Amino acid sequence: MSSNGKSLSSGLEDYIETIYAAKIADEDLKGADLARKLNVSRASVSEALGKLVTKGLIQYNSYETISLTQEGVQEAKKVYEKHNILKLFFESVLGIPSLEAGENACKIEHIISENILNEITKFTNFWLDHKEFSKMYTKKNKP
Amino acid sequence: MSSNGKSLSSGLEDYIETIYAAKIADEDLKGADLARKLNVSRASVSEALGKLVTKGLIQYNSYETISLTQEGVQEAKKVYEKHNILKLFFESVLGIPSLEAGENACKIEHIISENILNEITKFTNFWLDHKEFSKMYTKKNKP
DNA sequence: ACAAAGTGTTAGGCATGCCTTACAATAATT
DNA sequence: AATTATTGTAAGGCATGCCTAACACTTTGT
């Protein structure tokens, strides 16, 4: 039991996340576009989409736009959410440049625990609500 | 070119890190011990140790204690350091329980960027130096 | 409509890392 | 020393995910 169940490998999470991002941005997305966005071959995309279809997370017919099923949207939202939390934390608390923040979020989102993610969320909110602190931190560390 | 160079896969990093931890704790470590610590089979350990020997990071003869070469110690220290930084951050800033902090650190240490790790270090130090903030944060969030 | 460009799939491979089974070698215990 | 327990290794497999090459199918543009 491994390619049948619900749980997504981090690879597939990347695919579904990218598909969701395109949907949000109102972009049409075909397999070849995915390949370009993820920097993988069309062959790899073909495999991955096959798995996602099997899992019932996307709808896809060759040469047409990829779309998410309801279940797919749910899954994607989870990952996307994680990604955003991490990225925001890296950027706004740690002052990491957007690109690097995104790249790291993209890797970490697949393995970090729910609990830590929640705490990071809380913490980031706190930090953004207390500019006194962040100003002081910035002063001390980026003179 | 992949099993020859210096760069360690995250799997091998786990092995070398565990070997280093044992060294620090002054424990003798044999292959079977490693298998138990890492929850993998002896066969997997055997393979991994073979790779580490090839890479010149450990010294090892069957039935004897595993030891690190100088280069191995260097590599191990890097990973270990990363691990500790992350764990400390999770525990002391986010208030994550030790076990969970360690488990997450163990996965994230392999993929996070140097730069973010540095910023996390700075931030954690700042946080520990400003108990006023941490007290306030704790009050607001763990009432 | 037809050629060129773009897209998708299949087949065959590579690398990681893990597993089980079966067997070999060494250590420990009696 | 002999038996038992521990430890190590080799072989054969599984799963992930990625690749190239070759081929097939569509879409586009002239």
Image (spheres, coloured by chain):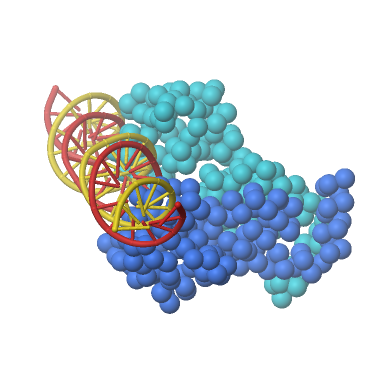
Chain colours: A blue, B cyan, C yellow, D red
Q: Is residue B14 visible?
A: no
- D22 or C14: nearer the eye? D22
In the rendered image, which quarter contains the N terminus of chain A?
bottom left
Up the image or down, B51 lies above or below A99; here it is above
Q: Position of residue A54 (x, y in %)?
A: 30, 66
Question: Residue C16's image quarter?
Answer: top left
Task: Say whether residue A129 is left or right of residue B115.
Answer: right
Up the image or down, B68 lies above or below C19; here it is above
Q: Is residue B30 visible?
A: yes
Q: Position of residue B34 (x, y in %)?
A: 40, 39
Task: Say whether residue C16 is left or right of residue B43.
Answer: right
Q: Residue at x 77, y 55 (%)?
A: B127
Question: Residue B49's image quarter?
Answer: top left
Q: Position of residue C15 (x, y in %)?
A: 37, 35
In the rendered image, which quarter contains the C terminus of chain A?
top right
Q: Position of residue C10 (x, y in %)?
A: 23, 51
Q: Residue at x 48, y 48 (%)?
A: A39
- B56 or A15: nearer the eye? A15
Task: Say whether residue A92 is left or right of residue B26.
Answer: right
Q: Residue at x 65, y 50 (%)?
A: A99
- A114 or C15: nearer the eye? C15
- C4 or A2: nearer the eye? C4
Q: Residue at x 55, y 69 (%)?
A: A26
Q: How many marks?
A: 0
